[in-house]
Amino acid sequence: MDSAREAFDAPTPAGPRDLLDASTDAAAIVSADGAVAGWTRGAEALLGRPAAEVVGRSAAELVAMDRDPARVAGVAARCRAGMGWSGVISVRHRDGRLLDVDLRVSASFRIGDDECFLLSARKRTQQWTVGQSVLDGFLTRSPVGMAVMDLQLRYVWLNDTLERFGGVPREQRLGRRLSDLLPGLQAVALEGLMSKVLETGVPVTDYEYLGWSWADPHRRHAYSTSFFPLVGDDGSATGVCYMVQDVTERWNARRLLSLVNEAGTRVGTTLDVMRTAQELADFAVPGFADFVIVDLLEPVLSTEGHGTWLTDAGPAPVRPVMRRAGMCSVREGCPEAVARIGDRVDFLPPPHDAGLLIDGEPILIPVLDPSDDLWTTEQPERAASIREFGLHSLISVPMRARNTALGLTTFVRSLNPVPFRSDDVLVARELVARAALCVDNARRYTREHTAAVTLQRSLLPHALAGGTALELASSYLPADPTDGVGGDWFDVIPLSGARVGLVVGDVVGHGIAAAATMGRLRTAVQTLADMDMPPDELLAHLDDLVLRLSVERADDTAAAQQSATAFLGATCLYAVYDPVTRRCTMARAGHPPPVVVAPDGRVSFPEPPPGPPLGLGGMAFEATEIELAENSLIGLYTNGLVEGADRDIEQGMFRLGELLARSDADLASLCTSAVRQLVPVPQPDDIALLLARTHALRADHVVSWDVPVDPAAVADIRARATRQVEAWGLGDLAMTSELIVSELVTNAVRYATPPIRLRLLLDARLTCEVSDASSTAPRLRHARITDEGGRGLFLVAQLAHRWGARYTADGKIIWAEQELP
């Protein structure tokens, strides 16, 4: 044991001594036989016993508890297993006092040959006790309202806070039910919850509700209440306690945040300025205000010019010109308003001027006074309305977006007795800011859409000229405004030889870019058709043009970034109908095939080789020729007419054929009816339908003669042509026709390759055609004074309405047309 004490006192570098030095508790080392082997100053301070009185003696003498050998043996076994033990025991101070200590016994360890245990103890501190006065003060002055109800839900006790919340004195509450005192606080629902708590014993926490109280009868408050049962000694319920907090500020903040978030989904659902303004007014009533008006500057509603006031554009007019764009009231018909939707207004809360719209802050008038001189002088009608309908609080918020003044939104309360506060101004500002962005987006879109529609309308044909070869009708239906203007187009192009070109196309994309590209392609088709190119060659040249347009767009990076629609390509169908042969030659580039309705009502869809869409390049186009019986109906259309979310293109084509097979209808009515029935509601794509009923040129209106390759034959051919013109009753054109035939036939005889043939056509114009096997076209030139020839084509150009050349599989045709008198 002495060796154990020496080991305990020696300054060894490790072991139990380190543990003891690091501890502020009382500590001792006890051997396996229960003797104290080490004693610290902490132990001496705790029990008042110096080491000399304790070391070597039994530790049991220090314990003020009955001996329990079994328990001691169990603790020792646990510590020998390396787990240690902790618990509470009573020990005896040197002066006889009993102390309760928290005792911890370490796992066993060895000092030399002896098995030992390290014991550490700390005096248990006495728990703080609450005095009755402290408890009473807590219950009475707590910021949480508290009350105790008996089994009949009558007040037994309540604190000062609850008395202040309800505004009903304590004396009037005790012994009475909540429903007897505060009917504006959803008393029936609250008593139902308390009854449920008494029946089930299950508490209800954080139940939120709204209500009015006598303490603040003009303002609705939000409360959060918890209920729990009171239980007696026998476990039965003796009553119910409830605690309530006024959470009005938190509830208002949450409600207003929800209001602002909801506005993002309900305001600005369309790209229409007036509709967006009305959505703002409808949304704010009655959740935020009782009467709302939205007035927009007149230029904002205009589709001409910029349509705005820039906020840095200098001084504005003293009284801005606005129009009522939106209005809503809790009263049916908005009787408070002195102006109706669409009326011109100049309302600004006195004494403000137009500067409010440009750079002013929101205006809060918590209390409206209709007798104020400013109102009675500047706004007499509105002052009368304020007085008549009890309008008592107002917020006016300027509408601005992207450095642009748009108008003014005014919120008014009348039936809601609570005046607007500064927090409401923040909400009003946020609501108007969101709506202003939507209004500005709608304004910008409307201006661009109007420009695109105007451009598109200007580029489409205003009159269709099919001559006597075709009876024509067309229908064009723009896309839904929310999807933007598309690039669909159609055209009818008179060609030489009484032929007519029919074209329909669709540019990829929407907006001004698509409309402008459509115009360029339509112009190109007219130019190429005027050169009498066959359909397949025309599409090949058009494909080259689209490729160049795509390269231009790719090179113009800035334009590509600014444009919402990138031009990627187009589809097109081009057909040429010849009333002499009744044959129709067509080619298509990625476009749906035409529909043909025979005179007997049979429907077919002749399919030329589809060809690639324009803009891909490097692929050939093929033409197909079909013969059409007289009075056949041919229809060219864009895919928007036959495609839709509810049907595929084959179903749409079948339905189109059914509708067009009703031959009893007038062609224009048939065209309009087919579009209306196929597309009853706005679609995301433009729709074009071009119908043509074919006619054949009468046989007696076409004559032709073979021309011998002999200059002497010119006179005979000229005479025949003159007699035929006179036979048609066109004596006024006999002389000019004689000159034109003479020049064209003479040139062919001199320079062309046989066979040579002259053909006269009487259609909407009188046409003279001279064909030969040569591929060399004549060239118009100005002859010098000394030249003996070279004036023939110049003379033809002067006499004819128009003239030209076209190539055929066998050579070429030189033609000249004259207007009929």
Image: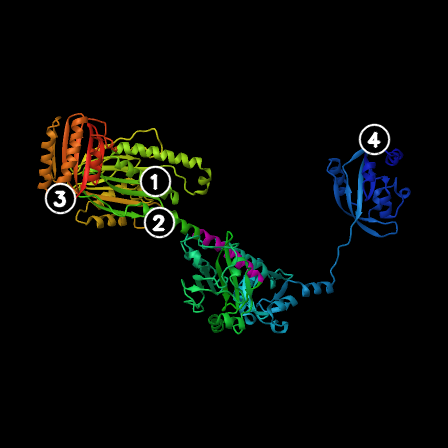
> Where are the magenta residues, as a range?
422-442
Which of disc 3 and disc 4 is earlier in sequence?
4
**Is residue 434 a member of the stretch shown in magenta?**
yes
* Closest to the observer, 162 or 249: 249
Left or right, 544 with reference to 371:
left
Query: Is label 4 in contact with label 3 (beta carbons under 8 Å)?
Result: no
Instruction: Report the residue marked by disc 4.
Output: 113
Give the amino acid type for the residue marked by disc 3 in the picture: Asp
Mark yes or no: residue 14 visible: yes
| Residue marked by disc 2 | 454
- Residue placed farthest to the front in the image? 786
In this rendering, position of residue 287 left or right of residue 754: right
The prevailing secondary structure element of the residues shown in magenta is: helix
In the rendered image, which residue does mark 1 sit on? Answer: 520
The label nearer to you, 4 versus 3, is 3
**Secondary structure beneath label 4:** loop
Residue 59 lies in quadrant: top right
The residue at the point 20 percent across, 38 percent down is 499
Residue placed most toward the observer, 205 or 705? 705
Q: How far is disc 1 from disc 4 in space, using C-alphas?
A: 109 Å
Badge 4: few (under 14), some or many (20 or more) residues near its Cα, within 10 Å? few
Left/right of residue 58 with respect to residue 513 in the rendered view: right
* SS under mark 1: helix
Label 1 or label 2, whichever comes before in sequence order: 2
Tag 2–tag 4 contact (CB < 8 Å): no
Q: Residue at x 9, y 41 (%)?
A: 726
Identified by mark 1, the residue type is: Arg
Which sits earlier in the primary sequence, circle 1 or circle 3? 1
Q: Where residue 576 sits in the image (x, y, percent)?
A: 22, 37
Nearest to N terminus: mark 2 or mark 3: 2
Sequence-earlier tag: 2 or 4: 4
